[in-house]
Image (spheres, rainbow, N blue to C red):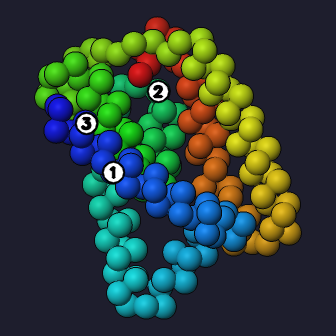
Amino acid sequence: MKGAKILAWVVIAIMGVNMANVVLNSGFHHGVGFDTFLAGASSPWQLFINNDLVTGLLFIVGWMIFREKGGRTIDTVAWVWMAMWWGNVVSAVYVLRAVAQANGDWSRFFLGRRAGALTGTPTSPLVRGIAGIGAIAVLVWTALGIHAAGFAPIPTFGYVMGFAPVILSLVLMALPARGTSQS
């Protein structure tokens, strides 16, 4: 499990540096990267890379769906949507969550609820409050970004599809399922 955690943190660090580069040198004003993703379709190699990313993400979301069976459907939707939009940084966070829930049991790591009850610590009221405030902040920031982009179709689509799952995930953290452990 230690290796999975280390790998997940390496992915998060690499993607964090890349996200900082985007924020500092490009910003989100043109559609949260959606326009760049679409523009890549004109180059055979960029189209190959884009499709490779998406098909690889289909494997991880397939595992997420399989592993989450028996839980709240909205939680699974949030994980899948986040992974398909934000990519491998979300996959890495999911792996960290799976490691924490597995408590050292590889079958629970891979199979989730199918291997028995999942462990984990309940989400503290402080984290829930921060998540709720974060959801409101991201909602306002998204609305301001859409307005600043002049409601242009591609940036608006990028903002909505990119940040709606972030907002949903924060709301789900703020309002965890009753009677289940959250981690």
Mark 3 to mark 1 CA distance (whole Å): 10 Å
Mark 2 to mark 3 CA distance (whole Å): 25 Å
Q: Quadrant of residue 156?
A: bottom right
Q: Is residue 61 visible?
A: no
Say what secondary structure mark 2 lies in. loop
Q: Quadrant of residue 4?
A: top left
**First along the sequence among labels 2 and 3:** 3
Disc 3 marks a residue whose amino acid type is Lys
The nearer-to-camera label among 1 and 2 is 1
**First along the sequence among labels 1 and 2:** 1
Disc 1 marks a residue whose amino acid type is Val
Q: Position of residue 95 (x, y in %)?
A: 30, 38
- The residue that label 3 is drawn on is 5
- The residue that label 1 is drawn on is 11
Say what secondary structure mark 3 lies in. helix
- The residue that label 2 is drawn on is 72
Closest to the observer, 162 or 96: 96
Q: Residues within 10 Å of mark 2 (few under 14, many from 20)?
A: few
Q: Position of residue 120 (x, y in %)?
A: 35, 16
Closest to the observer, 77 or 5: 5
